[in-house]
Amino acid sequence: MTWDSYASAWADLHGGFDPRQASPLVRGWVRIAWRAGVLLARLGLGPMAVTLAGLVLCLLVPLATLLGPLGFVLAGVLVAAAAFADSFDGAVAVVTGRASRLGYVVDSASDRVGEAAWLVAFWLTGAPAWLVVTAGGLSWLHEYVRARGAAAGMSDIGAVTVGERPTRIAVSIPGLLFAGLSALILPLPVATVAVAVWLTLQLIGLGQLTVAVRRALT
């Protein structure tokens, strides 16, 4: 599958958002996923297998933190690996022509479970429970509002907000890595700061998405 045909198919699955018109960072990431999808497809891996592998990696994240400071670092590495799997399962589905509504639901559910596991890891590294629960609730609400907007007739994704899943990944990886390094050198509330940043971005993103959904449905 060529890049152009992949980008067109990817856009159809993401509310018409064309990665060829996106920022260099987003466009580059989607191109990496395309190449990885082609490779994994040639190896005979299906999208569901990649999705489940990513979910297993996510569930290992809080367990890794139980190992102490070095476990925090390992947890950050596991989040990065899970993020790659999360991008590559969709790429495999597009490349192999095996994208399905069931796969979409399983992938979305796996994303939410995985993010909950990351937040549990932050709690285990020292973030307050109330902050973790609030951040998780806002993340869930962000995705729920978009899903209900689409069910109500919104024709696209509404808006690409500052609270999207890539942002949560971008907060989780350095948050866990630096929490581990800080615990080894100079104990600081890194986990708390990371979750606070997560919560703030979700709150802003939810506002952006709410405005977009209201504009699309009225």
Image (tube, rainbow, N blue to C red):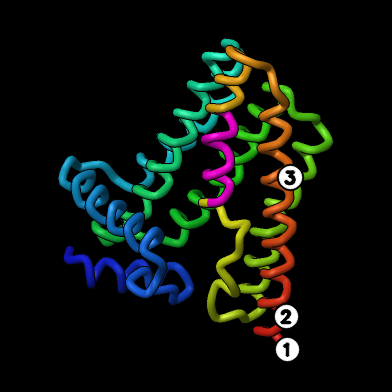
Residue at 31 percent of width and 73 percent of height: 8
Report crowding for label 1: few under 14, some 14 to 19, many 20 or more residues within 10 A (C-alpha): few
Report crowding for label 2: few under 14, some 14 to 19, many 20 or more residues within 10 A (C-alpha): few
Under mark 1, the amino acid is: Thr
Q: Say whether residue 213 is left or right of residue 86.
A: right
Chief secondary structure of the magenta portion: helix
Under mark 2, the amino acid is: Arg
Residue at 58 percent of width and 57 percent of height: 164
Task: List the residue tagged with mark 3.
Answer: 135
Q: Residue furthest front?
A: 186
Task: List the residue tagged with mark 2.
Answer: 214
Quarter-of-image position of residue 155: bottom right
Residue at 37 percent of width and 75 percent of height: 21
Quarter-of-image position of residue 149: bottom right
Label 1 near label 2: C-beta < 8 Å? yes
Q: Say whether residue 59 is left or right of residue 47.
A: right
